[in-house]
Image (cartoon, grey):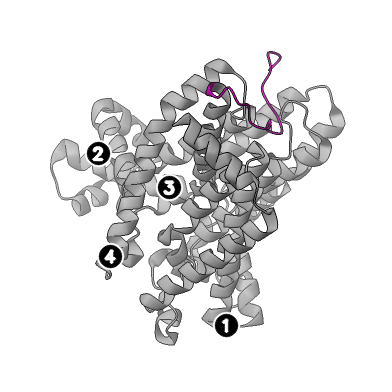
Amino acid sequence: MSNLLHKLVNRFEKMDKRLLFLILNALAIGLFFFVAFRYNYMHPDNMGRLMFTTPDTKQYQTVADWMFGKSASVPFATTLRPLLYPLLLGSVWQVSNNPYVFWAVQFLLWLAAINLTALAAYRFTKQLLAVVIAFCVMMINVSTMALTFYALTETLVIFLLALWLMLLSTSDLRVLKVREIFWLTFLLALLTITKPIFQLPLIIFVTYAAIKNLRQSKKNLVLAIGLIPVLLQIGINANVNGMVGVSNITEYTVKWYLLPQVYQARTHVPLDDARSVVKNFDTLETVRYLLEDVGTTTSAFLQNVGENMTGACEVFGYYPKPYNFTRFTSIAHLVLQILLVPAVIFMFIKRQGSFDLHLKLIYLFSLLIIFTSGISFNEGDRLVIIALPMWMVMYACVPIGLLEHTSSNRLPAPIYSLDSSV
């Protein structure tokens, strides 16, 4: 197996990089439009209908309308939906309210995200095989294709995360430069005001960077400047909604999904009745109730994680073939995530090769996205699909990193390798 992988690596290294990317992009665009036309996404009637067909899309539209002066009263959705995605939506809508225009923007973000992820995989490993793995596995994910036709944050999040990974691949986390600190922090801040779940990765990275540069005031100042998007979001919420924080979406989700789910499991009442009972719980009551029966809460939480990791793309509900294919790809990703565990442990112990401090951070962030999805259910693959760029980098880098450890014919070294000083 090692010899076969090594032969593949050598074969791909003989290819011209630009030609390879050109071929891969042509395949991606062709596949996208095959799926789009095959399932009538490009039809004018469907294009206009689908863009704002779900409750979440309507909330983003409502916030965008308020931001651009089309609504005088402050909508409740502003407490749940941070402002970056509605800002993008409203800005495009100012140019043209034709749904094809906003879809085109999201299509370009989708294509750019695939290229940035593949480029990050290459920069981490210096292997064109990594480009092929990351690009191909990511482009065949039809869930991300379908989501470009909906006014939902996933496409923007995947793009921003891919851009963050590409910048991370050119940085040395052990000795971060000023501009690297700014851009890595700034992009995580943008992710946070798009999808608040990225508050956790942002806190981890900022804490790491602050401790690493404790006595360097210039770097800490730049770190603070990178947080400006989050600070602006918090300030707007304080001024408009009288609340402190980026969003109330986590509290809302727990009280609409996990809390009534646990209540239902403990009392055996219908879910709607459980929601009626717990909807007026305050934060302290919610935490207390969830901790009263840790076993039931943990069971519900892990059940949700499992369902989210194996869920299909719900927007394909009317088309069995792509719906089942998205479920298959979700299950395949779950299997690959499980298979990564021993490989990651092995490479952690070895502390050398391509799986260095960067990929440890990526792996941690990926796990955070997976497990925080446990507070919700019936969302298909939407809650975890945003981790796709991180998974692609892992799939590309870990096998090549293992090959570096096991092969007597050493591969070209990655940009940054671990050493005993880390």
Give, as a three-letter code, the residue at label 4: Lys
Mark with earlier residue (2, 1)? 1
- The reply to whether residue 241 is in sight is no
Between the residue at mark 1 and the residue at mark 3, the CA separation in whole angstroms equals 30 Å
Residue under numbered circle 1? 97
Q: Which mark is residue 384?
A: 3
Residue farthest toward the right in the current orientation of the protein? 218
User: Residue at image x 49%, y 67%?
Assistant: 148
Front residue of this view, candidates 419 and 128: 128
| Of marks 2 and 1, the one in the foreground | 1
Give, as a three-letter code, the residue at label 1: Asn
Mark with earlier residue (1, 4)? 1
Which region is colored magenta?
406-422
Q: Secondary structure at mark 1?
A: loop
Residue under numbered circle 2? 262
Majority SS type along the magenta span? loop
Q: Name which quarter of the figure residue 413 lies in.
A: top right
